[in-house]
């Protein structure tokens, strides 16, 4: 079946009520700084003596990301945010009903801003008390959360960020030290490129087509066959991270199931049970439907952003196989264009370069 659109700009296609409502809420809400990741990262690094270490191995980093994935709060639905303040107006909290078909996010906030203390997050340290009220680009940050960043997170990274580690290792008169100084004073906005993956389109096709469990088993087999210690460590790291992603998805399924047990509305209870069923299957196993395929992309996309700042990462062409195959199959089974658009309008999040 070839599915074509008479109007490729979708001028004749309307948003569903669910998508329209989520869009309205998103643009009504202001970004919120989330301290969940920096708290978890700092706790793990302190407990495992990674701060100040000469070299942190790829396996140690993988175990750290697995810890974050498995221990972060599984958010199925958000229920509040903060109103973008107009000129001369105060910021106000507002509540809403989240009806998204996709659970999970990179932060614990509805429109969350994720922080990376090992990269550039310490740059907002002087603004912790004013970031919510500044005139340009305000970000909501509660006083309690600001206090945690100021006392329990940022101080431990003063000498252990990527920049400070590089500064300490290179002689002051070296080319590398000059490059660091240039980056700091002249091109600070490009500094993030040295800290993460950038301008990249991740390939989600194998995760969608085969599931992460098969990829985990393949990595284990290659680890066991490898004679090179570095190769064994590399494949062990792959296993750790992918198990962390699977664990996070299972936690979301458990949370959705728990919410369903306390839900009196039959339609809402059914929606939660559907989320639980889907997240218990993917991304661990192959996606069978368009919605399951997009859920796999969403969870893997979330995991990538927990590791790396979003500096030019892109979802790429979602109309390519295997998602396009799942879409066409579902279209034959009755999926409408409007329903497909609704699925594509997943939760969007602001990703700062912190």
Image (spheres, rainbow, N blue to C red):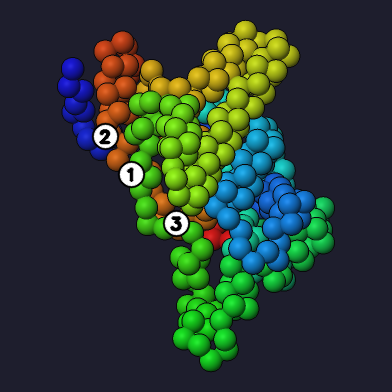
Residues marked 2 and 3 touching at CB (< 8 Å): no
Quote the CA–CA distance across marks 2 and 3: 23 Å
Outermost residue toward the front in this view: 227
Asked whether 224 or 41 is in front, the reply is: 224
Residues marked 3 and 1 touching at CB (< 8 Å): no
Question: Which label number is shown at residue 132?
Answer: none
Question: Which label number is shown at residue 316?
Answer: 1
* Mark 3 crowdedness (10 Å alpha carbons): few <14, some 14-19, many ≥20: some
Query: Residue 31, position in %: x, y?
Result: 61, 51
* Mark 1 crowdedness (10 Å alpha carbons): few <14, some 14-19, many ≥20: few
Q: Secondary structure at mark 3?
A: loop
Query: Residue 98, position in %: x, y?
Result: 60, 29
Query: To which quarter of the image does residue 340 belong?
Result: top left
Asked whether 59 or 302 is in front, the reply is: 59
Query: Residue 301, position in %: x, y?
Result: 47, 41
Q: Is residue 159 left or right of residue 284?
A: right
Quote the CA–CA distance across marks 1 and 2: 9 Å
Q: Total number of numbered labels? A: 3
Residues marked 1 and 2 touching at CB (< 8 Å): yes
Q: Which residue is mark 2?
A: 320
Q: Is residue 242 left or right of residue 293?
A: right
* Residue 208 visible, this orientation: yes
Question: Which label number is shown at residue 197?
Answer: 3
Name the image quarter holding the N terminus: top left
Disc with the residue nearer the chain's start (2 vs 3): 3
Asked whether 32 or 103 is in front, the reply is: 103
Q: Secondary structure at mark 1?
A: loop
- Looking at the image, residue 147 lies above or below residue 235: below
């Amino acid at each position: 079946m070839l599915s074509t659109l008479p109007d490729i700009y979708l001028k004749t296609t309307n948003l569903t009520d669910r998508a329209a409502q989520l869009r309205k809420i998103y643009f009504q809400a202001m970004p919120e700084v989330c301290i969940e990741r920096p708290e978890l990262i700092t706790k793990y690094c302190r407990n495992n003596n990674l701060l100040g270490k000469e070299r942190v191995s790829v396996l140690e980093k993988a175990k750290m990301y697995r810890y974050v994935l498995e221990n972060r709060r599984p958010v199925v639905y958000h229920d509040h945010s903060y109103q973008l303040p107009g000129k001369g107006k105060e910021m106000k909290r507002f509540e809403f009903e989240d009806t998204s078909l996709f659970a999970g996010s990179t932060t614990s906030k509805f429109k969350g801003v994720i922080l990376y203390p090992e990269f550039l997050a310490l740059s907002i340290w002087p603004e912790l008390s004013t970031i919510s009220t500044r005139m340009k680009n305000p970000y909501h940050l509660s006083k309690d959360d600001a206090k945690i960043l100021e006392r329990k997170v940022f101080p431990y990274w003063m000498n252990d960020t990527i920049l400070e580690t590089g500064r300490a290792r290179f002689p002051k008169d070296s080319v590398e030290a000059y490059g660091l100084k240039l980056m700091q004073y002249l091109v600070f906005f490009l500094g993030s490129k040295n800290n993460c993956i950038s301008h990249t389109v991740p390939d989600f096709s194998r995760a969608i087509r085969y599931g992460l469990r098969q990829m985990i088993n393949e990595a284990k087999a290659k680890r066991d066959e490898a004679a090179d210690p570095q190769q064994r460590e590399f494949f062990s790291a792959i296993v750790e991270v992918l198990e962390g992603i699977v664990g996070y998805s299972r936690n979301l399924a458990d949370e959705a199931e728990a919410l369903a047990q306390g839900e009196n509305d039959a339609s809402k209870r059914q929606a939660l049970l559907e989320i639980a069923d889907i997240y218990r299957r993917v991304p661990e196993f192959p996606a069978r439907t368009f919605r399951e395929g997009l859920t796999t992309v969403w969870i893997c996309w979330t995991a990538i952003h927990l590791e790396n700042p979003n500096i030019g990462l892109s979802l790429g062409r979602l109309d390519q196989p295997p998602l396009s195959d799942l879409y066409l199959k579902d279209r034959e089974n009755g999926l409408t264009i409007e329903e497909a658009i609704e699925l594509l309008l997943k939760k969007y999040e602001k990703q700062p370069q912190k």
